[in-house]
Image: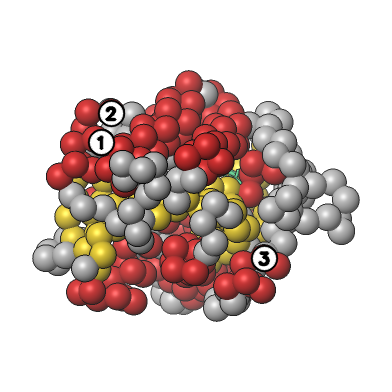
Amino acid sequence: MRTYLVTGGAGFIGSNFIYYMFRKYGNDIRIINVDALTYAGNLANLDGVKDRKNYTFLRADIRNKDAIEKIFKENNVDIVVHFAAESHVDRSITDPEVFVETNVVGTAVLLNAAKAVWEKDDGTFKEGKRFLHVSTDEVYGSLSDPKDYFYETTPYDPHSPYSASKASADLIVKAYVDTYHFPACITNCSNNYGPYQFPEKLIPLMINNALAGKKLPVYGDGRNVRDWLYVDDHCKGIDMVIEKGRLGEKYNIGGHNERENIQIVKTIISTLREILPEDDPRRNNVSEDLITYVEDRKGHDRRYAIAPDKISSELGWLPDTKFEDGIRLTVKWYLEHKAWMENITSGDYQEYYRRQYSV
Ligand code: NAD
Ligand code: TYD
């Protein structure tokens, strides 16, 4: 039985990935979820799998060399799927150091621990071992020509401390491939949306605020473009790269779904008004009058857009979920998980929100 070590499995994409993998492989795989449970990690995301015999949670920080080495020594890990990261651009602007520590140093610690147990005496690696480093399209910087896309060959040009730390991590992974022929692949995916996303990110923040009748803070002119992908389609891509990706390669993942931020906010409002029952008092709160243009993010990248040609032609990946369906599923999920949202937005979140939005 194959053993997957998933880092950051209590976060947004990691928890969706764990559900995706158990739906697909059932009892044929074992998953060990290693997560430090930062503000972004939430074990309640995994309530649906926590009692499975082939699932284990280990609380550990990927920066902690001893703890990580111990986990690799005690478990015969076949596949590492590395999600754990500080992931929010705004937080990276106010507090960049932890981004370097977790995203860069943490990745190096994991690579080194995997190398120590996977490498044979002759310097080659044991059969079937794979390290999948989950990265972002933000490493490529920002596009100005509307006909341009990010390809795997696009030079790295990160701007925020977040994207710079992810770019650095990608390069450390590449260095392991180039130097040791370490069995790794990198995926660079566009913006994800779906269940379990922390409400500091655009889509869940807007859903949560609209339901509470709070202002919807749109940065700058609201015309920055992001390329949105439903989270399950990202998980499908990661699984395909693990199964069929060529070792040492990187693959962009994105579904050609570019939208301006203001379009996203208006779609959330219309979807909420469509789904909320007539007699739900929150329905009266939801209107475009809540939209408020606020000071722009520092160094705000204008447009991201992925060319997924390589993963589509080599591995046959295509997204399954159209944005219109995905956003309905997502809005419905947040409406049905009111307690999850209340739990996550109590405590520290309030303080973060006041600081970030000066309210
Ligand atoms: P998230 O912030 O929701 O989750 C991150 C998880 O990592 C949390 O569970 C947190 O507790 C854990 N973590 C943080 N620091 C840790 C540490 N030092 N040790 C162990 N665990 C730690 O992030 P996400 O949105 O799920 O993103 C997951 C990965 O995917 C990240 O690497 C991110 O760069 C990448 N990515 C995200 C998107 C997106 O749109 N969200 C798009 C492309 C790539
Ligand atoms: P975000 O979800 O933080 O993802 P990223 O910055 O990694 O792309 O933001 C998505 C877009 O939405 C980005 O252009 C910034 C913008 N945005 C707002 O306009 N208002 C907000 O309150 C937030 C959180 C983001």
- The residue nearer to you, when weighing 198 against 339, is 198
**Disc sitting over residue 310 in the figure:** 3
How far separated are the C-alphas under marks 1 and 2? 5 Å
Mark 3 residue crowding within 10 angstroms, few (<14) / some (14–19) / many (20+): some
- Residue 196's x, y, as percent? 38, 57
Which residue lies at the image location 24% right of the left edge and 35% below the top edge? 69
Q: Earlier in the sequence, mark 3 or mark 1?
A: 1
Q: Is residue 98 left or right of residue 67?
A: right
Q: Amino acid at mark 2?
A: Lys
How far separated are the C-alphas under marks 2 and 3? 35 Å
Which residue lies at the image location 36% right of the left edge and 69% below the top edge? 20
Residue 145 seen in the figure: yes
Q: Is residue 337 left or right of residue 141?
A: left
Above-or-below relation of 91 to 126: above
Q: Amino acid at mark 1?
A: Ile
- Residue 87's x, y, as percent? 48, 40
**Disc sitting over residue 65 in the figure:** 2
Which residue lies at the image location 54% right of the left edge and 61% below the top edge? 246
Which quadrant, please, contains the N terminus? bottom left
Q: Tell me the element at label 3.
A: helix
Q: Is residue 145 left or right of residue 154?
A: right
Q: Quadrant of residue 307?
A: bottom right
Disc 2 residue: CB within 8 Å of ligand 1: no
- Residue 170's x, y, as percent? 55, 40
Disc 3 residue: CB within 8 Å of ligand 1: no
Which residue is under mark 1?
68
Which residue lies at the image location 60% right of the left edge and 58% below the top edge? 251
How is colour applied across the structure in the image? secondary structure
Q: Earlier in the sequence, mark 2 or mark 3?
A: 2
Residue 285 seen in the figure: no
- Residue 11's x, y, as percent? 36, 49
Q: Amino acid at mark 3?
A: Lys
